[in-house]
Image (cartoon, helix red, strand yellow):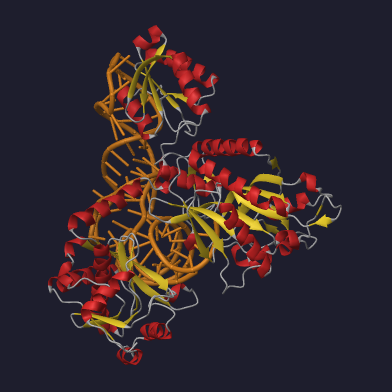
RNA sequence: GCCGGCGUAGCUUAAUGGCAAAGCAACCGCCUUGUAAGCGGUAGAGUGGGAGUUCGACUCUCCCCGCCGGCUCCA
């Protein structure tokens, strides 16, 4: 640690901290912007008392910095800080770097408790200044970067001088609370988020993208298209009312999955929404998950029941109804099971984070020798389902235990075996995945499929979990070929994850323009004048008889207005009918893309559309 | 739950201490129409809820509720 190196080399070396795939220039701009912001924030708040700085890294599209401030920050403070940052930028102050010893650093940051903690971590040589573990081959250095008199403990890298930034390409976005080191038991700091780019046009493009994202936000589209509603006053936060249009989509999703499950040898079940608390004590859900459950219900005889937070204990009880033979396995029990979980109010989000949701659940009970094959079959099914919607941009994540936490049940060897079987099964797929600590379920490791919403927030959809603990806790058995009892292994799986969250993601994925088979209304009949309404009705009846969802616009609007209305509701087909069509038994087919297919015989249109529906095609016309 | 922002008609927005305003949607009527808004009219909120300051509050203060962005947590 004492071999101090030249500034030029330190600059060079810091480049290694730029993450793969992150534009190096932008990374340095944003990292530097964080420092400049910290300088400005200190100037703003120090007259009111001490300002302690924590960490301030670049993030996707921007940066943040965490502070302990002497008073509450407000919007006016942001405006001031942003203004002041512009001045610092125009000052073209160099970023000077030097390496120091831990003791020098401690002396320098004697009044900065968060920095002292970071220095200790660096000095111990295990973690970087963000508290993340360092790769074994990286030798930690303690470096300081200084601009315009502001010194910060930082590994870099930075731009050469503040003038490399442009005030016009920088914007402070929001103030948030953030716990020190991400732990809610630690003090809450004030985090200020900003975004920074090379030039103004890039910033404007980014802001425009954010606006566009808002337009396809499922919460906005869900309301506009009559898909779902939340009524917090009388129904409750996080409880979804599926409006008729949304219910149609959901019904189609359920039918699709049921067909696939039937073909894959699943059997159905229906189980209750509540169960005695002992059931959940046996499963381990209670009290492990006590804080994420609604409080127990009690009857007059003193029995306590829990609104179910998960479906698996009920399916296990179905398994336990009688002796099971090895010949029955794998047994695959499927149910769209609605569960209720107490989520903190600040965590709720539209359809993607709710308090009552329906898991497209199934539990497989398998012999140990069947595990890998069954797991692989399930993964194949999940992939097939996701791809049927054109969802290609997902991330596969193997969630394993956090060794620090005690929220898990079962012993180490069992966890190890279950984890290994997941990894083995995954080898058979051309699928990239990441292994993440702390993402396991409390009863076992899992494979999750994660997608991002329009605002780039990640949501877990499908999940497949190997479970050797619940069979143990419920003492599940089957009689083997050897006429002796054996313990089955369970697989939990849900391709959608939950219908609510999947719906939210689908709305955004399609920007509300559902594929034909899912569209709440598939056809809008557009009669040109009142006299064409009877013909439009007749065509509608024909199409309904073929199983399509059709409505006739018999309002006294002009045809143009009818088309516009259907277009805004993202109805796939608009069938315009006037004198020509009525005479010839045809319809003029307009797609919501704006494309006009021209006149088609009603029967031809029906044949085309029903074919596309049957295929669950993502197209509106045959190729 | 915590930090910040916000809450006006079904929706989108105006009114910053002095008569709550408009567009769209809804309803009624006229027009009878050829691929994204024809014309006219009617009705609709007392400003999320509750206290307070004031001659007077959508506007200022406090408490509560909810929503949005984060944090934590999660399907």
Say whether residue A428 is left or right of residue A119.
right
* Location of residue A250 by image quarter: top right
Res. A193 in view: no
Identify the residue at image location x=67%, y=63%. Answer: A285
Image quadrant where one finds the N terminus of chain A: bottom left
* Location of residue A570 by image quarter: top left
Front-most of A406 and A378? A378
Image x and y of residue B29, in percent: 34, 21
Image: A364 above or below A101: above
Image x and y of residue A621, in percent: 41, 25
Say whether residue A490 is left or right of residue A232.
right
Front-most of A401 and A524? A401
Res. A516 in view: yes
Image: A603 above or below A32: above
Image: B75 above or below A10: above
Identify the residue at image location x=42%, y=75%. Answer: A134
* Location of residue A216 by image quarter: top left
Residue farthest top in this picture: A583
Identify the residue at image location x=18%, y=66%. Answer: A165
Image x and y of residue A317, in percent: 76, 53
Front-most of A450 and A565? A450
Image quadrant where one finds the C terminus of chain A: top left
Q: How many marks?
A: 0
Image x and y of residue A490, in percent: 69, 54
Residue farthest right in this picture: A483
């Amino acid at each position: 640690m004492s071999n101090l190196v030249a500034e030029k080399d330190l600059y060079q070396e810091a480049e290694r901290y730029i993450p793969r795939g992150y534009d190096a220039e932008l990374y340095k701009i944003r990292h530097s912007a964080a420092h400049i912001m910290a300088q400005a924030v200190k100037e703003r708040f120090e007259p009111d008392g001490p300002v302690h700085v924590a960490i301030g890294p670049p993030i996707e599209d921007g940066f943040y910095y965490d502070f302990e401030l002497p008073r509450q920050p407000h919007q006016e403070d942001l405006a001031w800080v942003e203004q002041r940052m512009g001045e610092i930028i125009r000052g073209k102050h160099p970023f000077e770097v030097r390496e120091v010893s831990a003791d020098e650093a401690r002396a320098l940051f004697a009044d900065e408790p968060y920095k002292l903690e970071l220095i200790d971590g660096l000095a111990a040589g295990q973690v970087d200044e963000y508290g993340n573990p360092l790769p074994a081959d990286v030798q930690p250095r303690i470096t300081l970067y200084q601009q315009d008199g502001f010194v910060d403990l930082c590994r870099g890298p930075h731009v050469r001088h503040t003038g490399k930034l442009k005030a016009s390409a920088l914007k402070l976005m929001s103030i948030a609370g953030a716990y020190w080191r991400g732990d809610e038991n630690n003090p809450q700091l004030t985090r200020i988020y900003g975004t920074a780019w090379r030039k103004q046009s890039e910033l404007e493009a980014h802001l425009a993208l954010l606006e566009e994202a808002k337009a396809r936000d499922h919460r906005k589209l869900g309301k506009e298209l009559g898909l779902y509603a939340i009524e917090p006053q009388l129904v409750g936060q996080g409880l979804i009312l599926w409006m008729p249009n949304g219910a149609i989509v959901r019904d189609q999703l359920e039918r699709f999955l049921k067909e696939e499950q039937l073909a894959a040898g699943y059997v159905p079940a229906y189980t209750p929404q509540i169960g005695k608390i002992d059931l959940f004590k046996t499963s381990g859900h209670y009290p492990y998950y006590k804080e994420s459950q609604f409080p127990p219900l009690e009857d007059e005889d003193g029995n306590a029941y829990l609104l179910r937070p998960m479906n698996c204990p009920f399916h296990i009880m179905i398994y336990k109804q009688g002796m099971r033979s090895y010949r029955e396995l794998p047994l695959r029990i499927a149910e769209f099971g609605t569960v209720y979980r107490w989520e903190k109010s600040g965590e709720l989000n539209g359809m993607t984070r709710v308090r009552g949701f329906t898991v497209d659940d199934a539990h497989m009970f398998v012999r140990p020798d069947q595990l890998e094959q069954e797991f692989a079959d399930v993964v194949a099914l999940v992939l097939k389902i996701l791809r049927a919607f054109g969802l290609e941009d997902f991330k596969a994540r193997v969630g394993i235990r956090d060794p620090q936490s005690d929220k898990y049940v079962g012993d180490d060897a069992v966890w190890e075996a279950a984890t290994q079987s997941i990894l083995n099964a995954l080898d058979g797929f051309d699928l990239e995945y990441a292994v993440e600590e702390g993402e396991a379920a409390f009863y076992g490791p899992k494979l999750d499929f994660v997608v991002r919403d329009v605002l780039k927030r990640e949501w877990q959809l499908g999940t497949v979990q190997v479970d050797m603990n619940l069979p143990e806790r419920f003492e599940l058995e089957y009689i083997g070929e050897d006429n002796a009892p054996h313990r089955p292994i369970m697989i939990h799986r849900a391709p959608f994850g939950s219908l609510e969250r999947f719906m939210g993601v689908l709305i955004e994925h399609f920007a509300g323009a559902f594929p034909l088979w899912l569209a709440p209304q598939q056809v809008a009949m557009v009669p040109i004048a009142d006299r064409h309404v009877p013909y439009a009705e007749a065509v509608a009846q024909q199409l309904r008889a073929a199983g399509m969802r059709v409505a006739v616009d018999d309002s006294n609007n002009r045809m143009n207005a009818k088309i516009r209305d259907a277009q805004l509701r993202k109805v796939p087909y608009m069938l315009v009918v006037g004198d020509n069509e009525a005479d010839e038994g045809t319809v003029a087919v307009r797609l919501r893309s704006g494309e006009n297919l021209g006149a088609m015989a009603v029967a031809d249109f029906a044949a085309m559309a029903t074919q596309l529906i049957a295929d669950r095609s993502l197209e509106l016309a045959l190729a």
